[in-house]
Image (cartoon, rainbow, N blue to C red):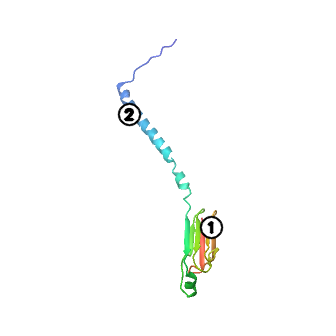
Amino acid sequence: MSQRRTTSPSPATRRHRPKARSLLWMLMAMAALLAACGSSGGEAASAAPEPVTYKYIIPNGTGERIEAGEPVQIVPARLDINVGDSIEIVNNDSQGHNVGPFFVGEGETVSQTFPSPAEYIDACTVHPSGQFMIVVT
């Protein structure tokens, strides 16, 4: 039968154990904190932004202003949006208007959500250039 010999740690070893334990606890706490916050940071960057609705209102009298030769700019010439964003066009005028790919009749509201990347460009009566482009990425 073999005998096991046990020795007690030296005083120097005993002094280092509390430091090692403290370091170990600190590392475990940091790991837990990183796990709770998302260790790679990539999850937050890849999360889709909240959808946005771009709302434009065509006021009453817009058609008369256009007929009088007054330049009218209610929408931008180009609108860059993200997939999932929407556009809402409210026509309070007594005439219908072309707004890019949409025709908005008198007193009507048109709403459209864009589910995939695309590019739309068409005639626009409520922009001085006569065109409205929507780019969805």
Q: Quadrant of residue 80?
A: bottom right
Q: Residue at x 58, y 72 (%)?
A: 90
Q: Residue at x 55, y 68 (%)?
A: 54
Q: Residue at x 63, y 70 (%)?
A: 119
Crowdedness of circle 2 by 10 Å Cα count: few (<14), some, many (20+)? few
Label 2 close to label 1 by CB (< 8 Å): no
Q: Amino acid at mark 2?
A: Lys
Q: Nearer the viewer, mark 2 or mark 1?
A: 1
Q: Residue at x 56, y 65 (%)?
A: 53
Q: Is residue 51 left or right of residue 28?
A: right
Disc number placed over residue 12 in the picture, else none: none
> Disc 2 marks which residue?
19
> Disc 1 marks which residue?
112
Q: CA distance from mark 2 to mark 1?
A: 63 Å
Crowdedness of circle 1 by 10 Å Cα count: few (<14), some, many (20+)? some
Dot 2 lies on which element? Answer: helix
Q: Amino acid at mark 1?
A: Gln
Q: Is residue 18 above or below residue 58?
A: above
